[in-house]
Image (cartoon, rainbow, N blue to C red):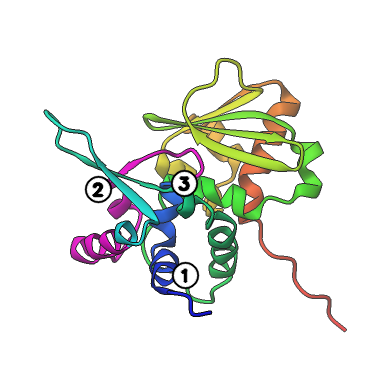
Amino acid sequence: MVVDQEPVHSACWLLAAAERGSDGFGPRRFNDLLGGLPGVSPNVLSQRLRQLTEHGVVHRRDLGPPTRVDLYELTKWGRALEPILLQFGRWGSQSPRLPDGPLGVDSLLLSIKAAFDPARAPALAGSYAFHIDSDTYLADVAGETVQLRRGTASDPDAALTTDIDTLRAVCGQEITMDAALESGALRLSGDEDARRRLTDLLLAPFAPAPRPATP
């Protein structure tokens, strides 16, 4: 059987953009996608989105007047790529040469899902809100999975409030969580145990890999 691999190639190339349209983060505008892909030109992104749309991986819809803004999101078939894309992301995160440019908030938070260890789910169970600048994201840990979505929660177990620069600095280990809290650039709410679970969930993907034992 011959399989047309072009949509898979395009989807893998556009991994970051595809992730931003999946798993509850909802439809994204062209500029949102472009902002999360450092080094990619508008022309190249337009071409790839057109290919993904033609192959049924991405759906484009027009909001209509007065905004006249196109929104992009993964189709049902495109969302079926999620396990492959997350695994691809895990592989890419081990690259000896990471891409230039700062990670966007979607990439930082999707790292939670890519690095999530189901064996730790019971210890991390709960509902957590991340208020990053003007956006709110929710992480729900239940069973053996973590689900991420954009939206609001009436009563999360714990919540983190900060700006994207502080989030990048904390995840990139440029400053500690304690230092960010002390400076007031980051705030945590919820009881002590829930705040600890939220912190563990957020920082697990960015913990240094253990060094191999010396013979």
Secondary structure category for the residue under label 1: loop
Q: Please rate how many residues cluster around mark 2, counting C-alpha atoms within 10 Å: few if below 14, some from 14 to 19, many from 20.
A: few
Residue bearing mark 2: 31
- Pointer 2 with pointer 3, Cβ within 8 A: no
Under mark 1, the amino acid is Leu
Tag 3 residue = 22
The residues bearing labels 1 and 3 have C-alpha atoms spaced at a distance of: 23 Å
Q: Which residues are magenta?
A: 23-51
Q: Residue at x 19, y 39 (%)?
A: 69
Give the amino acid at mark 3: Ser
**Nearer the N terminus, badge 2 or badge 1?**
2
Residue 194 spot, x, y in % from top left: 71, 27
Out of 86 and 116, give the one closest to the viewer. Answer: 86
Q: Which mark is residue 98?
A: 1
> Which residue occupies the foreground of this view, 116 or 200?
116
Q: Are marks 1 and 3 in contact (CB under 8 Å)?
A: no
Q: Choose between 182 and 120: the one closer to the eye.
A: 120
Q: CA distance from mark 2 to mark 1?
A: 22 Å
Which one is in front, 22 or 167? 22
Residue 34 belongs to magenta span: yes
User: In the figure, 169 relative to 181: above or below?
Assistant: below
